[in-house]
Amino acid sequence: MKALVRLTAIAALLSAFGASAHAGNLVVSVIDKDGKPVQDAVVVVAPANKTALPKTPLATQATISQEKMQFIPAVTVVSVGSKVNFVNNDPWDHHVRSSPAGMGQFSATNAGFELRLEGKPDGKPAKSTEITLNKAGVVGATLLGCFIHGSMRGYIYASESPWTAKTSSEGIATFEDLPEGGAQLKVWHADQLVDIAPQQVTVGAVLAKNVMQLTVVPRRRRS
C-alpha cells in the first residue's frame, strides 16, 4: 500500500510537470536499502552551468528549536554563510554542540561550535542564540547534540549549490528551471555513513526522473 502511495505521488508530479514542462525540471526519488521512501534526505544538484540561479534561492536564515528534547526540524538545509538561530522552548537548559556529521561523535578536537541555552522561563520569551555557517561540503553536514540530554540529535546541511532540497515523506525532491546540460546529482543522509556514488544527469526539455538508493535503512526517528 505504501509503495502504491509513493508511485501515485511520483506519477502526480510527473503529470503536473508533463502538461507544461519547461527545460530544467527534475524529480528525484530517494529510497532505502529495502526500496522504501526516505524522508529528509538532502538532494544536491550541481549543474555544469554555474552561472544560472533558481527562481527561489536557498534559505540564508533558519531557526532550529529545542522542544520536548528534540531539534526541530531534525534536518535543516541552508546555503553557505547562512545565519541559524537556536531557540530553547523547553523549561530546562540545553546545550547545542556541533561536529562534522561524519565523525559520529562529539569531542574537543572535532567540535565546530558550542552553545548553552537557558530553559524558557514560565510566561517569558524563550532564550535564543545565532551562529553563522561558513563551511560547505562534508563539513557542511553538521551533527547537533546536547551534552545534558544525550538522545538529542539534529543536522544542518550548508550547501554551495542553490539547487538543494530535502525529500518529502514520499522520498521525493523536485527541482524546477535547472539550466540545460549536464549536472551532478548527489544525496546525503545522516545514517548513510559511506557516501553513495553521485549520478551524472542531463537536463533537457523532457522532464527527468532519477532514483537514488541508500545502502542502509535509516533509523526510526524518535517522536
Image: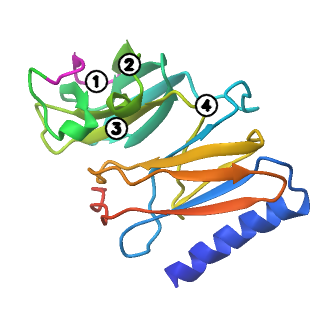
Q: Is residue 97 left or right of residue 58?
A: left
Q: Is residue 197 left or right of residue 99?
A: right
10 Å crowding of disc 1: few (<14), some (14-19), many (20+)? some
Q: Which residues are magenta?
A: 110-124
Residue 88: quadrant of the picture: top left
Kind of residue at badge 3: Tyr
Q: Which residue is painted at 86% across and 55% down in the image? A: 21
Q: Which residue is painted at 31% across and 61% down in the image? A: 218
User: Is residue 176 highlighted in magenta?
Assistant: no
Label 2, label 3: how many angstroms apart (C-alpha)? 25 Å
Q: Is residue 212 left or right of residue 5?
A: left
- Residue 106 in the image: state x and y as whole percent: 13, 31
The residue beneath circle 3 is: 155
Q: Earlier in the sequence, mark 2 or mark 4?
A: 2
10 Å crowding of disc 4: few (<14), some (14-19), many (20+)? many
The residue beneath circle 4 is: 162
Q: Find out whether the residues at labels 1 and 2 contact each other: C-beta distance under 8 Å.
A: yes
| Between 130 and 197, the one nearer to me in the picture | 197
Residue at the bottom extreme?
1
Q: Is residue 170 left or right of residue 220?
A: right
The residue beneath circle 2 is: 125
Mark 2 or mark 4, which is nearer to you?
A: 4
10 Å crowding of disc 3: few (<14), some (14-19), many (20+)? many
Kind of residue at badge 1: Lys
